[in-house]
Image (tube, rainbow, N blue to C red):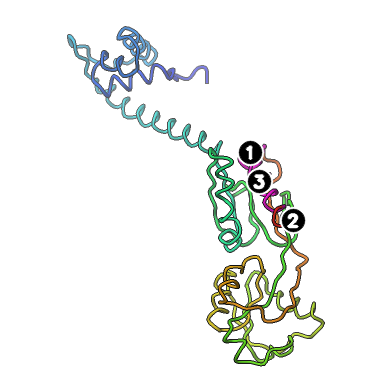
Amino acid sequence: MLNRPVPSTSMLLAFDMAARTGSFTAAARELRRTQGAVSKQILALEAQLGVALFDRRHNTVVLTEAGLSYARDVRAALDLIQTASMRVMANLRALTLAVLPTFGARWLMPRLPRFMKEHPGITVHMVTRVSPFDFRFENIDAAIHYGKPDWPNADCIYLMGEQVIPVCSPAFRAERVLRKPADLAGTMLLHIESRPHAWLDWFRAQGVEMPQCAGMYFEQFTTAAQAAAVGLGTALIPAFLLQDELERGELVRLFDMPYRSPLGYYLVQPDGRPAHGPLEAFKDWLLREVGKREG
């Protein structure tokens, strides 16, 4: 590197500004230097490169053919350095978080303004992920995960559990005699693709065999809840994600038989990465928020 012709940044800035303005005097004014200092930097640059970059004509300077080509490349390089520097500065105060879509929309988003108020300099970027991924190949700082604390090459910090309840529309319940779980035989059960055994676990927790039922599958709790609200069937959904629909009467509890899953929500962060200030601040805040809910 020491033997490569890499001019100093001050030389390049002086040359770029002189090339832009067509004047050493104007370049000095823009850079808040003396005209002599700018001229000296450009002379040093020409000496290092062994090429004349400007033709000096009385009180004006004009780029040579070599200078014109060099100016284009230097301008592109300086723009690239500026962009990279701004990106690094922004990332020092940015957090990219992978979230489960319904959890992010229903639980995290309403609380996020409190975090932003506490940490006004931090920017939070959220992306949707419904299953574990490899942090080595993703530009993501952390994830909120539901399941077991078994994410490869990562630390899982327990946040909270969940209680699921069977819900349906008032009309669906009124049109049928549904007094016990076995009465669901022959009806439509609404499933979440990421939790294919949720209904089976719920029936077992009630001490009954799962009856023969038709089924519909959805990617997200939100669409399953909407399907239940329009009377398509019964959904099994975490109670804390349904408060609005239950309060508005769009959904009703079918049975007073909740089931607490052995799985849980975790904040997951990759092993081996250096401490990241925005993530540490978010983690502390998130654990406080969870504590409020659990308390």
Question: What number is the disc on residue 276?
Answer: 1
Question: What number is the disc on residue 285?
Answer: 3
Foreground residue among 204 and 167: 167
Residue pictured at 65% horizontal, 69% vertical: 194
* Mark nearer the N terminus (1 vs 2): 1
The residue stretch that appears in magenta? 274-291
- Residue pushed farthest right? 207
Mark 1 residue crowding within 10 angstroms, few (<14) / some (14–19) / many (20+): some
- Secondary structure at badge 1 equals loop
Mark 1–mark 3 contact, CB under 8 Å? no
Q: In the rendered image, which residue does mark 2 sit on? A: 295
* Mark nearer the N terminus (1 vs 3): 1
Foreground residue among 160 and 38: 160
| Identity, as a three-letter code, of the amino acid under mark 3 | Trp
User: Which percent across, then down, holds residue 224?
Assistant: 58, 75
Mark 2–mark 3 contact, CB under 8 Å? no
Instruction: Determine the image quadrant of residue 271.
Output: top right
| Identity, as a three-letter code, of the amino acid under mark 1 | His
Q: Is residue 209 above or below residue 130?
A: below
The residues bearing labels 1 and 2 have C-alpha atoms spaced at a distance of: 28 Å
